[in-house]
Image (spheres, rainbow, N blue to C red):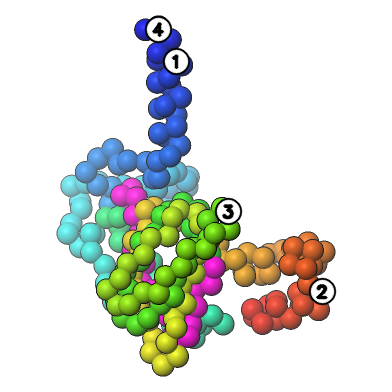
Amino acid sequence: MRNTFLPKILLPLILLIQVAQSDPDPLQDFCVTDVATTQPFFFNGAPCLDPALAIPSHFTTSILSKAGDTGANPFGFNVTLTNAKNLPGSNTQGLTMARIDIAPNGLVPPHSHPRASEVTLLLSGNLLVGFVDTSNRLFTQQLRAGDSFVFPRGMLHYLYNLNSLAPALAVSGLSSQNPGAQLSPLANFMTKPMIIYDVLKKSFQISAKDVERIRKNLGG
Ligand SMILES: *[C@@H]1O[C@H](CO)[C@@H](O)[C@H](O)[C@H]1NC(C)=O
């Protein structure tokens, strides 16, 4: 029993825990992004600045203090994100902050973050939020200012501003320094190169004309 414990039980357990983790844990107190680096190779996170050169301002940013332009896309939303460049102290810490501005009746269309769970705090306005699990069950809630909602990792979710007069402002914390985002309308209809008509026609049970119209409406 003793001899088989490690390979038979402990190893699979360790592997499982490794797979279930989000970003790898930092090996040092911090790893302030060396924004000036010209290292010609990629690795998991950005290269670290010499810790002795780190200063308090590396750990602060005003990037979320300004509203994004909600008129730059047909949906009426804008997301501003912290990242390892604009908030160098966040490098390797496994987190991202997002500022979400949504115009009156604007929508953050169904999308997913392949590498992060998300918790959203509504600061002002009214939002209808929802996510869909892998059995197509919808979990939806109406949020008022001060309410929070969790979007589990990888699940398709949306945020809709129910108010036709006032904008909505929310902030999110995401559990990865590179959450990634796939917006369902764009990932289907606005790819480069384009997904062939037959695939979209069959997938959505629509005509070639419908495909064309959707692409045009999305700005294609
Ligand atoms: C968000 O707003 C910025 C300007 O504030 C703009 O450059 C950018 O294109 C907008 N993003 C989207 C997805 O509309």
Q: In percent of the image, x 20 and y 63: which residue is there?
A: 57
- Magenta stretch holds residue 105: yes
What residue is shown with label 2?
207
Report the quarter where the N terminus lies: top left
Mark 2, Cα crowd under 10 Å, few <14 / some 14-19 / many 20+, is some
What residue is shown with label 1?
7
The tag on residue 135 is 3
Counting residues from the start of the chain, the first of labels 3 and 2 encountered is 3
Instruction: Give the structural element (helix, strand or loop) at label 4.
Output: loop
Q: CA distance from mark 1 to mark 2?
A: 55 Å
Q: In percent of the image, x 17 and y 59: which residue is there?
A: 56
Q: In percent of the image, x 70 and y 81: which residue is there?
A: 216
Q: Check whether the beta carbons of the residues at disc 3 and disc 4 lie within 8 A of each other.
A: no
| Nearest to viewer (mark 4 / mark 1) | 4
Instruction: Give the structural element (helix, strand or loop) at label 2.
Output: loop
Counting residues from the start of the chain, the first of labels 4 and 1 encountered is 4
Q: Is residue 205 left or right of residue 80?
A: right
Counting residues from the start of the chain, the first of labels 3 and 1 encountered is 1
Counting residues from the start of the chain, the first of labels 1 and 2 encountered is 1
What residue is shown with label 4?
1
Q: CA distance from mark 3 to mark 2?
A: 27 Å
Counting residues from the start of the chain, the first of labels 3 and 4 encountered is 4
Mark 1, Cα crowd under 10 Å, few <14 / some 14-19 / many 20+, is few
